[in-house]
Amino acid sequence: MRISRIYRLLRLITMLQSGRSYTVAQLAAELEVSRRTVFRDLNVLEMARVPYYYDRQRGAYRINQHFFLPPLNLTLPEALALLVAARRTVGSAVLPMARASEQASVKLESVLPQPVREHLGTVLTKVAVRPAPPARHHGLDEDFDRLLAAITERRLCRLVYLSFQERRQITVTVEPLRLVFIGRAWYLIAYCRRHRQQRTYKLGRIRKLVVTDRTFPAREVKEDGLFGDAWCMIPEGRLYDVHLHFEPKVAGNVAEVNWHRSQQVQWNPDGSIEFRARVDGLGEITWWILGYGDQVKVVGPPELAERVAAVARSVVALYGGQEG
């Protein structure tokens, strides 16, 4: 393609996204070409998936106003933060939106002044983000996009889902409410009509997704209330006042993290801590406690202490027959 035509196509795009409406005759006059050439150029834009359309009411052509975003005046720290997030965090994992994130980072770099681009290129080599290993999300981009559209349009969805809780594949009709990334994976938060309650579905376990034409009434979902007082994301319907004693060796690591919105930490003179939280369910927190081995003791409730002890006895039984 000749430079003159590329320049003309760029001018055409600029004109169509300006907010004004142009007829073919007006476009031809502005670009100093024939009507036939204008139609050929519009066909090139269509093949490039630039979403122009014909406004029948005005008898003119325009570009969808949401296709191109207005230019942003980013500061150096703002540009650096976006590039780090796109290229070092999301782009390092095979996750939905990763490709779009990488493409956005390329576009951002391309519009930065050369000195700024060179400076950021140097800085980026000095910054690294190492997220936790994510769950497998290969091939989920399409389901992610379809679910996002279904949430926006409030369309009922049918899921064929591999349920670890029920230990089988189930088929449910749900009202999709939120897409949430938790820890290592993307989850769909939805109201299940079969179970008549809000449930969580891991995207990687959705075996088949059908977005129907049926709609559902709006539901108010508060971000803070998605998982209630669960330790992570699975409430069990009963609240427990948890009290844990952490030894000095791990106390600092535990105290510096906001594990739960209700947690309270009290330091002891010897460097140990008393950790308290009001938690819905004991299943998730049990496995978290076990990760600290003999550096933590369950002070209460008794049900939690027995759960941890039962798992510990199973571990001893598993390895007890082996010689050291």
Image (cartoon, rainbow, N blue to C red):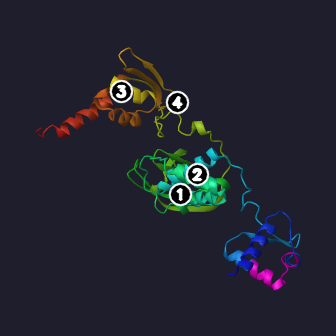
Kindly report the distance in space between the C-alpha atoms of the residues bearing marks 1 and 4: 29 Å
Task: Examine the rendered structure and indicate whether residue 258 appears above or below residue 128.
Answer: above
The residue range painted magenta reads 28-41
**How far across and how far down the image is residue 187, in percent?**
51, 50
Kindly report the distance in space between the C-alpha atoms of the residues bearing marks 2 and 1: 24 Å
Label 1 vs 4, first from the N-terminus = 1
Residue drawn at (53%, 49%), measured in percent from left and top? 123
Mark 1 or 3: in front is 1
Mark 1 — residue? 98
For residue 134, side relative to residue 30 (left or right): left
Mark 4 — residue? 261
Label 1 vs 3, first from the N-terminus = 1
Q: Residue furthest left?
A: 323
Numbered badge on residue 119: 2
Residue drawn at (61%, 55%), measured in percent from left and top? 117
- Secondary structure under badge 2? helix
**CB within 8 Å, label 2 to label 3:** no
Q: Say what amino acid the circle numbered 1 marks.
A: Ala
- Secondary structure under badge 4? loop
Secondary structure mostly taken by the magenta-highlighted segment of the chain: helix
**Label 2 neighbour load within 10 Å: few <14, some 14-19, many 20+:** few
**Label 1 neighbour load within 10 Å: few <14, some 14-19, many 20+:** some
Task: Examine the rendered structure and indicate whether residue 292 appears above or below residue 33.
Answer: above
**Label 4 neighbour load within 10 Å: few <14, some 14-19, many 20+:** few
Numbered badge on residue 162: none
**CB within 8 Å, label 1 to label 4:** no
Mark 3 — residue? 303
Q: Say what amino acid the circle numbered 4 marks.
A: Arg
Kindly report the distance in space between the C-alpha atoms of the residues bearing marks 4 and 2: 40 Å
